[in-house]
Amino acid sequence: MKQLSRVVLTVAMAMAGFGVSAWAQKTGEVTKPQINVRGQPTISSEVVGSLKKGDAVTILDSIKHTKVKADDSTNWFKIAMPANIRVWLNGMFLNTNDSTVLPPRLNLRSGPGENFSVVGRLAKGDTVKVLREKGEWRQIEAPATAYAFVAAELVEVKEAPVAPPTPVIPVITETNMVAAPVVETPAAPVTPVVPATPTTNETRMVVDLEQHLHTNTNGPMVTRQIIEVLPPARRVVAREGIVKPTYNIQAPSGFVLEEPETEQVINYLHTTDTNVVLRGFRFKRVFVTGEESIERRWPNTPLLHIETILEAPTNATPAEPSK
């Protein structure tokens, strides 16, 4: 019955003149003192939050209505859910142990009930951070996939700056070199180029540049350039700490390693080895070794790719924190 209702709603929206235009993701800025953020692109939809003048929004899509009521807006923007707005889901579909999603797909709604608008979806295994409970419904932080709607006339679109083109440096190889005429006068001495010492922990380029200069002004300068790209050095470390879960669904891993005394996060923990079950080490003190790397979105917390992990010998295991 619910599936039939969705089909009827989709057809009704199409007949009512809802149109979605092709749109590349852009940014915008609120131009009015205060505007409403809604669960659907119409002023009859519920208000899920508000924005003030100068607030930045991420525009995901542009929606144009061909038939609207007299007091409604014709153009709407679908935006990424602002950080100050929370969303709801049915708690019956969450694992009570680690707050992970159980079904293949789980709807996010603007309020605690099925009568509220769908504002996104989660997939099986996604982890959420529960903020409030209301009956069987749970309020959580909005994930990156959540969305809402604002009237387009209240937002000014900001065009992204165009990056300058990357200059193309031609490389003259031995196959396309042109030999200069041989002259009897002695050639000028050539000073060899000493390559700089390669730096560590990053991709290094060693350039051996040999130049043949000729005194004949009519002949070209012939250049041979050899480029060697070396792989980055591996950083293998050993760490000791307490394994704890993280409830941020945008984190690069579902578990972190914390310093036992200060409870500061040392690393995100990651493994592709099916024999290593991190859930079995939750809230335990461990010794772990592996390769440490930096994720571009998380520059302050390195990601540790586990090679070995052992429970540390201790007489007491830290208690699981209260939720």
Image (spheres, helix red, strand yellow):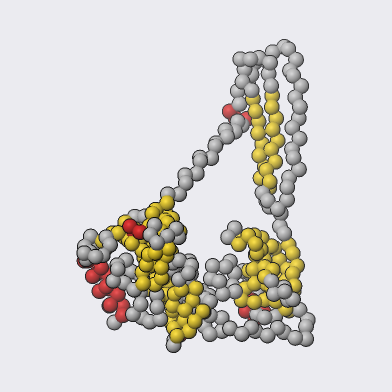
From this viewpoint, which residue is outermost toward the front? 33
Residue located 27% across and 73% down the image: 9
Give the percent coordinates (x, y) of residue 241. 72, 74
| Residue nearer the viewer, 4 or 259 | 259
| Residue nearer the viewer, 30 or 232 | 30
* Left or right for 224, reference 165: right
Residue located 33% across and 57% down the image: 153
Residue 48 is at least partly visible in this image: yes
Residue 309 is at least partly visible in this image: no
* Left or right for 235, reference 254: right
Residue located 42% across and 51% down the image: 158
Quarter of the picture holding the N terminus: bottom left
Q: Is residue 52 above or below residue 115?
A: above
Give the percent coordinates (x, y) of residue 235. 72, 59
Using the rendered view, name the quadrant where residue 63 is placed: bottom left
| Residue nearer the viewer, 133 or 125 | 133
| Residue nearer the viewer, 174 or 138 | 138
Using the rendered view, name the quadrant where residue 295 is placed: bottom right
Give the percent coordinates (x, y) of residue 184. 72, 11
Using the rendered view, name the quadrant where residue 275 is placed: bottom right
Give the percent coordinates (x, y) of residue 128. 52, 76
